[in-house]
Image (tube, rainbow, N blue to C red):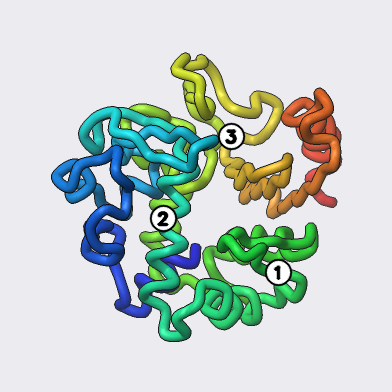
Amino acid sequence: ALFGIMQDQGLAHRDDFVTSHLGLNWAGNSVSAAQEAAIQIRHLQSHTSGLGEQLWLGRLIYLGAPDTLWEYNTLAYRKMNQIIEALSPQGDYHDYATASLYDPIGMNDAGDDGTHSSLQSARDMARFGLMMLADGSWDGVDIIEDKSYLDLMINTSQPFNESYGALTWLNGKSSYLAPKDPTVHPGALFPAAPTDLYAALGKDDKKIYVVPSRRMVIAITSSAYGRGYGQRRSEAILKPILASDPAR
């Protein structure tokens, strides 16, 4: 979303090559200059950079050319934070996010943990979901002006994982890939939910579900993650809400 705002401002485009903004060796010593030079920002958004990660070492590795595979890659997509900081008028990721997104929609608790991870309360997360539900607008003001960019976020972005857009998970598809699992699983991500649901599925079971057909946003923060709950707990919360009277 922040990059979409930056693109609206003419500061960058998702087809830009990452090297043009972060310079040489942005992918580290395990990836050659020629290999990293082929990677565009859109590849980071869709996990099609061709890079793998050794997360425990903080290291990116080369698996194949861009657009040849889908590999969920935290270290790769977080390079977008560095791009945003490098190109922002404020010269700081958090300050740019505050001016461009947090303040305009009232995300008053949003912060930065020092590594450019956005820390948000459940209310902040819900506000973000409501902004997405309103087609990138808040109180009649466009936060993300380019609606075609929003369409890219919430529709299948590549041919390998139907259920993935641009850093967004999609329901209602015929199959899905999960992070660090090469198996193509048949069926939708959330079979009990409406097919138009899309979601931000974050670290430690932080989740934002947006359901346009219900005009509904569900934000979940859970301390149960890592204690045998995770997705199962979120599904247990999600199912009765979606089964309730749509008029509510």
Q: Residue at x 68, y 32 (%)?
A: 193
Quadrant hosting residue 14? bottom left
Identify the amino acid type marked 1.
Ala
Question: Of marks 1 and 3, which one's residue comes earlier in the chain?
Answer: 1
Secondary structure of the residue carrying numbered label 1: loop
Using a 10 Å C-alpha cutoff, classify the residue at mark 3 as few (fewer than 14 neighbours), some (14 to 19) or many (20 or more).
some
Q: Amino acid at mark 3?
A: Thr
| Residue under label 2 | 79
To which residue does mark 1 refer? 110
- Determine whether, in the image, residue 4 is placed left or right of residue 108: left
CA gap between label 1 and label 3 equals: 30 Å
Q: x and y percent of residue 219 in the render?
A: 75, 51
Q: Is residue 92 left or right of residue 45?
A: right
Residue 162 numbered mark, or none: none
Whether label 3 touches label 2, CB < 8 Å: no
Which of the two marks, 1 or 3, is nearer to us in this view? Answer: 1
Which secondary structure, mark 2? helix
Report if residue 248 is visible in the image.
Answer: yes
Circle 3 sits in a helix, a strand or a loop, which is it? loop
Residue at 37%, 48% in the rendered image: 44
Q: Which mark is residue 195?
A: 3
- What is the number of callouts on the image? 3
The x, y position of residue 100, in whole percent, is: 53, 78
Residue type beneath disc 2: Lys
Q: Earlier in the sequence, mark 2 or mark 1?
A: 2
Cα–Cα gap, marks 2 and 1: 20 Å
Query: Which of marks 2 and 3 precedes in the sequence?
Result: 2
Whether pointer 2 and pointer 1 mark residues with C-beta atoms closer than 8 Å, the reply is no
Residue situated furthest left in the rendering: 34
